[in-house]
Amino acid sequence: PVTNADVSAVTKFLAAPERRHLRCRKRGNTIAIESGPAADRIPHLRVRKLSPKNWGVDAATHTGRWERMPFQGQLLEVLPRPILLFCRSGTRSANLFAQASQR
């Protein structure tokens, strides 16, 4: 299961100035990364714990579902690229996901 240490590591990663608009929360065996007001959350990504040291990444789609991404690895090694691709300030990840899928 996801531990408080896992959530703390992601929280520290998201504290960088360019990621300050993001936050995370534990949801079952995943850590959801989102933005926006608490009453109107915008989901961007979630990281799934596949094994004690291996994580997978899913991106939120415009239908409210999750699409698996081709990223796997240790938690802090797997986050930077999807965060850069799908979590720009002021954009919805679903729109970015659709744009990336068309390339």
Image: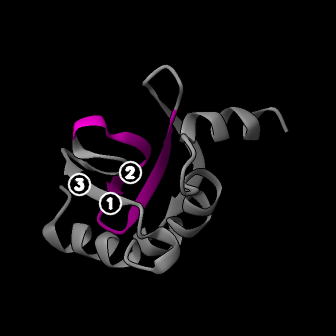
x then y, percent, for residue 90: 54, 50
Three-letter amino acid code of the residue under disc 3: Arg
Please provide percent x and percent y for residue 41.
Answer: 32, 40
How far, Cα to Cα, is label 1 from label 3? Answer: 7 Å
Give the image quarter of residue 4: bottom left
The answer to whether 34 appears left or right of 69 in the picture is left
Q: Residue at point 37% right, 77% down?
A: 15
Read off the residue under disc 3: 25
- Image quadrant where one finds the N terminus: bottom left
Q: Which region is colored magenta? A: 39-60
Q: Are circles 1 and 3 on residues that touch, CB within 8 Å?
A: yes
Magenta span: predominant SS is strand
In the picture of the structure, the residue carrying the numbered disc 1 is: 23
Number of residues whose C-alpha sits closer than 10 Å to that of mark 3, classed few (under 14), some (14–19) or many (20 or more)? some
Q: Is residue 20 magenta?
A: no
Between tags 1 and 3, which lies in front? 1
Q: Is residue 102 above or below residue 88?
A: above
Type of the residue with mark 1? Arg
Which sits in the foreground, 68 or 65?
A: 65
Quarter in which the C terminus is drawn: top right
Please report contact status of discs 2 and 1: CB closer than 8 Å, yes or no: yes
Query: Which mark is first along the chain, 2 or 3?
Result: 3
Q: Position of residue 23 (x, y in %)?
A: 32, 60
Which numbered circle lies on residue 35?
Answer: 2
Q: Does 58 appear in magenta? A: yes
Q: Secondary structure at mark 1?
A: strand
Question: Within 10 Å of the Cα at label 1, are there few (<14), some (14-19), or many (20+) other Cα atoms?
Answer: some
- Which mark, residue 83? none
Q: Is residue 57 above or below residue 64?
A: below
Structural crowding at the residue carrying mark 2, measured as other residues with C-alpha within 10 Å and reported as few (<14), some (14–19) or many (≥20):
many
**Circle 3 sits in a helix, a strand or a loop, which is it?**
strand
